[in-house]
Image (cartoon, rainbow, N blue to C red):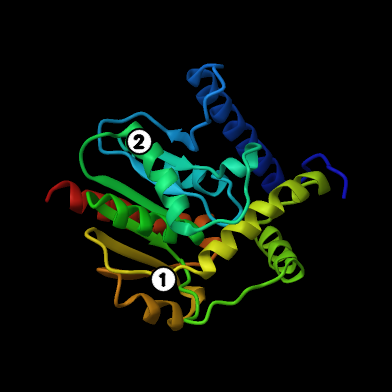
Amino acid sequence: MAASHPSTLEEKRRELLRLRLRRKREEALALMGSDRQPVSPLVPLSPAGTKPPLFLVHAAGGSVAPYAALAALLGDDRPVYALEDPGLHGATIGERRLPALAATYLAAVRAAQPDGPLHVGGWSVGGAVALEMARQDGDVALTFVLDTAIPDEAPSRPGDDELSAWFAADVAAMGAEPAEAELAERFPVFAANVRALLTFRPSRVDSRVVLLCAEGSGPGRLDGWRAYADEIQVVRGDHYTMLRPPHIEALAEAMRDRLREVGVR
């Protein structure tokens, strides 16, 4: 598959978004200097503001691109950072365990916000990582879980062929058309994150946990979270369209409301 020039308005919008995110990451790397220190996974999506920042963990694909539009809708005074998978930028991937991934990301978050309760969240796999970050830190005011699935009690162990099919479906549902070389680079990240999620078992944490579940995901996802979430709300769209117009506005409103509520407590 060869790379092609964007033709439709939606394709042009996605290409512009990718360029903006690339520029943000390059700016962040420049600020860190060139001393060959490990690159922080934090990407500033909307860093300005005086309110406590919100930290969003990437989904299975590893990119923070799905959060860019959401960050712009969470309020002018709300800093928003996202955690991007270092495997997309040359870091060793290998076999992963979700608690270790959460610990790595928590260290980066606490480097940015050393004091005070955190506000974290994530979509899909990112919701599971965010919940584990809340468990490990113990001082998290609010945890958003955005349409995250809870695996079966007996975890499956999919092979590369099955994961490749899942990856292709995920890329198609995202509306992306990356070149073959980019697909080859991204698949190991996707596979490692999905395998880590399949061993995930949620637990109650000392944080207000809010599950925002897509209406297209069905009642089974809601039932699985009732023992772990303090609040469950169904939002418009399916697993993918909940983060796109026109449904993203309702998702952002629900998140703004919860952030405002914990801010006055």
**Viewer-proximal residue, 194 or 259?**
194
Farthest-out residue, right:
2
- Could you tell me residue 188's position as x and y percent? 69, 53
What amino acid is at disc 2?
Pro
**Viewer-proximal residue, 92 or 265?**
92
- Could you tell me residue 11's position as x and y percent? 71, 46
**Viewer-proximal residue, 190 or 96?**
96
Q: Is residue 177 at least partly visible in the picture?
A: yes
Q: For mark 1, give the secondary structure.
A: loop
Q: Residue at x 88, y 45 (%)?
A: 2
| Residue bearing mark 2 | 79
| Residue bearing mark 1 | 201
Q: Is residue 246 at least partly visible in the picture?
A: no
Residue 134 appears left or right of 165: left
Q: For mark 2, give the secondary structure.
A: loop
Residue 1 appears left or right of 26: right
Q: Residue at x 58, y 25 (%)?
A: 26
Q: Tell me which numbered mark, 1 or 2, is placed earlier along the sequence.
A: 2
- Could you tell me residue 17's position as x and y percent? 61, 38
Residue 172 appears in which quarter of the rendering? bottom right
What amino acid is at disc 1?
Arg
